[in-house]
């Protein structure tokens, strides 16, 4: 698996020496404890492929028996039928394996197979079972140890020694609200989606990754804890929150909600966290884990999958993928990604971080057809040196699109807003805004949304194997619904000074309008409802005597039946132009 977070630090003199000494001492003290306490040797695995789905108690005429209502609704909305491939694996076959004493780890509906843990003598007992087509040996995993303590030390060093300066182009997203995520958000015009009220509400996003260390306690996810955060573990590791922070870092980029510090690309979506990555080893088994995870995402009705994992090289070199495999039809994980797309999900996959290495190409499953493969650019929109390239072996454009993956803001396991590099980070950023766009166009199919995203990108007329179709512009994508030079629900401008604030609205439709002024923490300081008339400017002045404004930044939220618009102002004696203008 390729997952990449480069440590970015700068300091000088004594502090650098002091903190390095603390860091190295911690490594020396904790690393042996990690090894001594958590090394485990896994047994051999085999993939068993069945000949058919006989003896099944399920029928495609009654898919409600094995697919969730949400999964069926997603298919029905897009005119996608349930097929025999969706039927569960024969329970009779699975029980027959278990009766021999073999441990069944995963089953795959789409591939009609099972992954088991067994020894050679166990496998000998299966030779007379006529429902087994073939079995494939998956070599034992190498000894492994969990890396949480080391990662915590890395996060601590990163925080103490400071990070690269993230100041620079804001691309229009207000830093007062988006904090350190303003740059990566503004580059994609993702804040425009949020300003129109599209922040992921009612979208279910499955994040398939390694562990989600701290996701059950970090402040950036507090809003998710209240409504529940389902999890599922497809690995040998115990639990999902206690090991490996890569998944939590990734999750913060898409889901965090910390006004003034960091806002994820889809903060109001619902999430399910799926761990498929075996930390400390690299085997074919991880592709099977990933397949089990994405099939589960389908079954529960996920709308979108974001996965910052990729496979090209394994501990057993003869199992390495070669470029010829990258045709979308060879690697099982790539085929599974395409199958998920065929069932109506949008699948977003990281391109990989091998652009400056000998391999240089994308990894599996980024070569899959009908998905969005995401590369990385820096804050100046130049391709990051590590971002893996295409094309696929059969000549298709990859990556599909790009997003900021160098100096990308995320919340680390200590709760601080840090920066890091990798297509691991550009992928959830892009995926969240795609979910918000689909929220805006619920009548569209997954492939229509992907088409809109590609068409909005800055290189769509001349895509290549480095940038793909380029960097999406979600304001342009949204203009399919709200033309940039035509209808918008309303335009807002504001003037704030020490005496108060004046808000001007220019509605495009007449009707009842809800006006709220909030602090960045969400506290409402003013609320009123007015009936406004189309194209008639409405002006509202509030003095600091009427409303107890404290120094700081405020959010004006205006809602009608046509949608929502947002404006920010602060008491700094300056006029702030609306981002909706």
Image (spheres, helix red, strand yellow):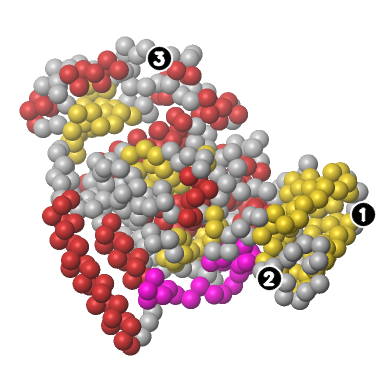
Q: Which secondary structure, mark 1?
A: loop
| Contact (Cβ within 8 Å) of mark 1 with mark 3 | no
Q: Which secondary structure, mark 3?
A: loop
Q: Which of the 4 quarters of the picture holds residue 188?
A: bottom right
Q: Earlier in the sequence, mark 1 or mark 3?
A: 3
In the displayed structure, 318 sits above or below 555; it is: above
Tag in front: 1 or 2: 2
Q: Which residue occupies 48% across, 39% down?
A: 228
Which residue is label 1 attached to?
A: 536
Q: Is residue 224 magenta?
A: no
Which residue is label 2 attached to?
A: 551
Q: Can residue 500 be seen?
A: yes
User: Residue 230's x, y, as percent?
Assistant: 43, 38
Task: For marks 1 and 3, give the CA distance.
Answer: 61 Å
Chief SS of the magenta region:
loop
Q: Is residue 178 magenta?
A: yes
Q: Is residue 578 left or right of residue 187?
A: right
Q: Earlier in the sequence, mark 3 or mark 2?
A: 3
User: Residue 455's x, y, as percent?
Assistant: 62, 51
State the mark number for residue 527.
none
User: Residue 544's x, y, as percent?
Assistant: 79, 67
Q: Residues within 10 Å of mark 1 (few under 14, many from 20)?
A: few
- Chain part drawn in magenta: 159-184
Q: Is residue 89 left or right of residue 435?
A: left
């Amino acid at each position: 698996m390729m997952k990449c977070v480069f440590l970015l630090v700068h300091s000088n003199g004594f502090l650098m020496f002091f903190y390095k000494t603390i860091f190295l001492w911690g490594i020396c003290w904790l690393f042996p404890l990690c090894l001594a306490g958590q090394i485990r040797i896994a047994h051999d695995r085999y993939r068993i492929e069945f000949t058919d789905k006989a003896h099944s108690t399920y029928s495609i005429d009654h898919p409600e028996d094995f697919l969730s209502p949400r999964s069926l609704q997603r298919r029905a909305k897009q005119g996608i039928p349930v097929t025999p491939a969706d039927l569960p694996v024969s329970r009779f076959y699975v029980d027959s394996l278990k009766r021999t004493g073999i441990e069944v780890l995963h089953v795959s509906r789409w591939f009609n197979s099972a992954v088991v843990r067994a020894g050679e003598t166990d496998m000998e007992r299966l030779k007379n079972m006529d429902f087994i087509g073939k079995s494939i040996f998956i070599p034992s995993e190498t000894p492994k140890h969990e890396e949480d303590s080391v990662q915590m030390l890395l996060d601590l060093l990163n925080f103490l020694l400071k990070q690269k300066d993230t100041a620079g182009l804001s691309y229009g997203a207000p830093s007062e609200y988006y904090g350190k995520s303003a740059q990566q958000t503004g580059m994609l015009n993702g804040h425009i989606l949020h300003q129109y009220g599209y922040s992921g509400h009612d979208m279910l996003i499955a994040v398939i990754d390694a562990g989600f260390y701290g996701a059950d306690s970090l402040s950036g996810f507090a809003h998710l804890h209240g409504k529940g955060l389902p999890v599922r573990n497809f690995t040998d590791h115990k639990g999902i929150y206690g090991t490996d922070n890569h998944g939590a870092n990734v999750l913060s980029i898409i889901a965090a909600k910390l006004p003034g510090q960091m806002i994820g690309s889809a903060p109001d979506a619902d999430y399910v966290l799926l761990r498929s990555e075996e930390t400390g080893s690299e085997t074919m088994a991880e592709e099977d884990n990933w397949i089990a995870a994405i099939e589960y995402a389908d079954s529960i009705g996920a709308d979108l999958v974001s996965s910052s994992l990729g496979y090209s090289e394994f501990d057993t070199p003869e199992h390495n993928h070669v470029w010829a495999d990258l045709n979308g039809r060879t690697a099982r994980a790539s085929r599974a990604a395409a199958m998920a797309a065929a069932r109506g999900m949008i699948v977003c996959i990281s391109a990989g971080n091998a652009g400056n290495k000998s391999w240089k190409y994308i990894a599996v499953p980024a070569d899959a057809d009908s998905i969005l493969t995401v590369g990385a650019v820096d804050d100046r929109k130049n391709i990051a040196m590590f971002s893996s390239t295409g094309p696929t072996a059969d000549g298709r454009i990859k990556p599909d699109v790009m997003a900021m993956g160098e100096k990308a803001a995320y919340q680390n396991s200590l709760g601080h807003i840090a920066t890091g590099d990798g297509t691991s980070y550009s992928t959830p950023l892009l995926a969240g805004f795609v979910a918000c766009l689909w929220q805006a166009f619920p009548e569209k199919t997954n492939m229509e949304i992907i088409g809109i995203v590609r068409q909005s990108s800055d290189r769509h007329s001349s895509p290549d194997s480095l940038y793909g179709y380029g960097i999406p512009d979600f304001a342009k994508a949204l203009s399919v619904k709200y033309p940039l030079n035509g209808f918008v629900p309303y335009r807002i401008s504001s003037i704030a000074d020490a005496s108060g604030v004046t808000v001007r609205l220019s509605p495009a439709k007449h009707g009842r309008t809800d006006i709220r002024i909030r602090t960045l923490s969400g506290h409402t300081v003013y609320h009123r409802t007015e009936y406004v008339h189309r194209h008639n400017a409405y002006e509202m002045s509030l003095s600091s005597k009427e409303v107890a404004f404290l120094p700081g930044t405020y959010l004006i939220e205006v809602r009608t039946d046509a949608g929502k618009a947002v404006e920010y102002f602060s008491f700094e004696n300056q006029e702030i132009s609306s981002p909706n203008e």
